Image (tube, helix red, strand yellow):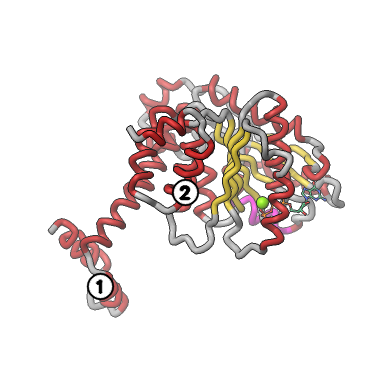
Amino acid sequence: VQPSVDQVKLGNRRAIARLMTQVENDEAAAHEAIASLHSATGRAHIIGVTGPPGSGKSTLVNEIAKRMRQLHLTVGIVAIDPSSPFTGGALLGDRIRMRDLSGDDGIFIRSMASRGRLGGLARMTGSVVKILDAAGYNTILIETVGAGQAEVDIASAAHTTLVIETPGMGDEIQTIKAGILEIADILVVNKVDRPGSDRTVKALRAMLHMGLAPKPTGHHGVDTNMDTKERTNVKAQTTWEVAVLETIALEGKGIDTTVDAILAHETYLRESGEWLLREISRSRLEVDQLLQAQFISQLQATVPESEFKRLIVEVAKREIDPYSAVNQLYRQMQM
Ligand SMILES: Nc1nc2c(ncn2[C@@H]2O[C@H](COP(=O)(O)OP(=O)(O)OP(=O)(O)O)[C@@H](O)[C@H]2O)c(=O)[nH]1
Ligand SMILES: [Mg+2]
């Protein structure tokens, strides 16, 4: 066991930061460290906070963290920057907002840049979360912009997912329904100081009543991966009703209720057996991601890029079908 792993488990901030950097640089040493940290994880409550750009996620995360600290819970925060280029000003804004949290040993904040990454963001985020979990943080908040599949993957890595909306969504509400609502355990309408908030809250509640709530257990798709026997053993009988909460994060309003809902969801997860189902779902995702990463790196190591490109062009020209192309690549990988 590397000394840094022991230091991380003891909560040494420098060791934590150093290992996170190694993870981001995808260093081989980091893989080993993460592997040996695994057995020390599984205690933290992992909360995903997602929503459109500018909806107030960072402000809300900041307030939630402050409330959690009042309740004597330690908090890790992983902020994933919007994939669109951000200005120094916006970043500075985040720093200022987070300032009242820094200097508190019970809080650890880490920003991750998605810009310029070729992939693996979800996997790296998973490792960073794992480090915080092993270091003993009770609660881990992950902020992501609700948009692409990568963000949904990151949200599925959470036990509890908060979806943030803002007033004045209008017709957009139909598009929201399609994707992001299905992953919500708690819906938060932030900026209710703005006009039209009542309409937004009502519309969201109506949508939930129409078809989504109460949510059956195992909704993260895990039940399709398990046979009936496994499922009945877990005895998940209770259901969870997705609440629509109202906040003014900027003024710290509605935060206590939000934190209460988060903690109630954790209790529900543990008492219903859903916690284990989500852990299985999270582990499934993790193994899938590692499999893909390992497959790609083996492919890159054994098949020259030019050869790979040549095959793709052949597929495009209908000289070869994609199945045969994959078979060829497989054969080369095994040689
Ligand atoms: N009026 C109002 N403004 C708010 C509220 N909460 C946050 N804001 C403001 O909304 C803007 C965006 O807030 P952020 O917390 O940075 O939003 P975000 O969702 O993290 O933004 P990105 O990370 O860039 O997607 C800031 O100017 C906040 O001050 C609120 O409750 N009411
Ligand atoms: Mg933000």
Residue 33 position by quadrant: top left
Q: Above or below — where is 159 with respect to 288?
A: above
**For discs 2 and 1, the disc positioned in front in the rendered view:** 2
Side (left or right) of 156 relative to 36: right
Badge 2 element: helix
Could you tell me residue 120's position as x and y percent?
Answer: 43, 53
**Residue 301 highlighted magenta (yes or no):** no
Q: Residue at x 38, y 47 (%)?
A: 289
Q: Is residue 6 toward the left or the right of residue 243 in the image?
A: left
Q: Magenta stretch containing residue 172, yes or no?
A: yes
Precedes in sequence: disc 2 or disc 1: 2
Mark identifier at residue 311: 1
Q: Position of residue 193 (x, y in %)?
A: 86, 47
Dominant SS type (magenta): helix
The residue type indicated by label 2 comes to: Thr
Query: Which residue is the site of mark 2?
Result: 21
| Above or below for 206 versus 279 | below
Disc 2 crowd, CA 10 A, few/some/many (<14, 14-19, 20+): some
Of the 4 image quadrants, the one containing the N terminus is top left
Q: Which residue ends up furthest to the bottom in the rendered image?
A: 317
What range of the chain is rendered magenta? 171-179
Residue 209 screen position, x and y as percent: 68, 38
The residue under the point 26% across, 60% down is 299
- Residue 165 visible, this orientation: no
* Horizontal side of residue 130 vs 58, given as left or right: left
